[in-house]
Amino acid sequence: MLRIDGVTVRFGGHTALDTVGLDVADRETVCVLGPSGSGKSTLLRVVAGLQQPDTGRVLLSGIDQNGIPAHKRQLGLMFQDHQLFPQHNVQDNVAFGLRMRRTGRRESERRVGELLDLVGLPGVRNRAVSSLSGGEQQRVALARALAPQPRLLMLDEPLGQLDRSLRERLLVELRQLFRRLGTTVLAVTHDQGEAFALADRLVVMREGRVEQTGTPLEVWQHPASEFVARFLGFENVVEAMVRGDKAGTSWGEIPVPAGTPEGGCRLLVRPTGVVLTGPEEGLRCTVTGRTFRGGATSAVSLLLQPEAGPRLEATCTLPAAPQMDERVGVVFAGGDVVVLPGG
Ligand SMILES: Nc1ncnc2c1ncn2[C@@H]1O[C@H](COP(=O)(O)OP(=O)(O)OP(=O)(O)O)[C@@H](O)[C@H]1O
């Protein structure tokens, strides 16, 4: 459906996109994830035809889009500040793209009704946009982007402004909606939770380059670099020397996956792989941070300062959680140890 091929964009001396390549298949939802300034929005703008690349091509259904203006690319755009017309009612906002295409009034009204049902807002047709809540406005923006039946829907931080519980609910609904409609989606976000919930495939960007692509599970299980691991929120990274099925580190010996090449590398231990034991067992640590995360699992995040080596992050349940300044022992679970490539 979409092919981005060797796209480079420079602003003066700064390279915002550096030979980026990316394919999005028909009906696939791809989320581009990366820190602020990594080039995500620029990538969307290039696909939309709002930014001319210095080199490279954008193909939609095999056709090079060079020279095709934004409004002729048949794309649906939904940007962060959802750019609705606040003084107009919902009907007029959702029908905007249909008017551009000269759709008749009756057909347009039918389609708007259908879309409002779809996004869970039946009966708001005549309300002023300014009278809707933030979440409702977001849904109107989505209905507006979907109305002209774009061949590719592009979302830029679609749920950025919303509170957490609303965001989580909408994410689930959006995913179901895209499945049902067979929509092809390219979304960008800096929020990994949003990307994981929405995407069939993730693209992690760093300084204008694609650092890793894969399904959310692939990226989570095998981050391609320390950058990706840290971006996903994994902090337990340490220098290691692998010998057989163990690695020597400043935290002591850690089991490594079978087949790990011998020699120096960097290891990641997911917080779930840092297992608390009695204070006389394993690596001795002091609890220096303790945050109750709540949620269905009543999880507690712990920061542990070991006798030697960098600080560790661990998680446990509330009943099992030690207190601040308490001394604990730690052993490492092999299943949560990842060898970072290029370390
Ligand atoms: N029109 C422009 N002129 C000059 N520099 C620009 C322009 N647009 C973007 N940049 C620069 O290009 C880089 C990438 O910007 P971009 O907006 O694509 O990043 P992003 O990953 O979307 O960031 P954010 O998550 O903060 O929106 C940044 O360093 C930005 O300052």
Image (cartoon, grey):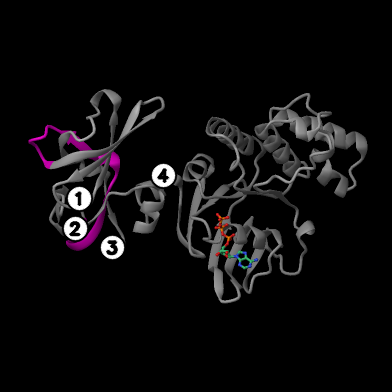
Mark pair 2, 1: CA separation: 10 Å
Mark 1 sits near ligand 1, with its Cβ under 8 Å away: no
**Helix, strand, or loop for circle 3?**
loop
**Pointer 4 residue:** 217
Q: Which residue lies furthest to the bottom in this view?
A: 13
Looking at the image, is mark 1 or mark 3 nearer the viewer?
3
- Amino acid type, callout 3: Gly
- Amino acid type, callout 2: Ala
Count neighbours of disc 4 (C-alpha within 10 A) and say few if under 14, some if 14 to 19, many if 20 or more. few
**Helix, strand, or loop for circle 4?**
helix
Q: Is residue 62 visible?
A: no
- Left or right, 17 with respect to 290, comes to right
**Pointer 3 residue:** 343
Q: Is residue 258 visible?
A: yes
Closer to the N terminus: mark 4 or mark 2?
A: 4
- Amino acid type, callout 4: Leu
Mark pair 1, 3: CA separation: 15 Å
Residue at image point 55% right, 71% down = 15
**Pointer 2 residue:** 240
Closer to the N terminus: mark 1 or mark 3?
A: 1
Closer to the N terminus: mark 1 or mark 4?
A: 4
Q: In this view, does 71 lie above or below 122?
A: below
Tell me which segment is drawn in magenta. 260-283
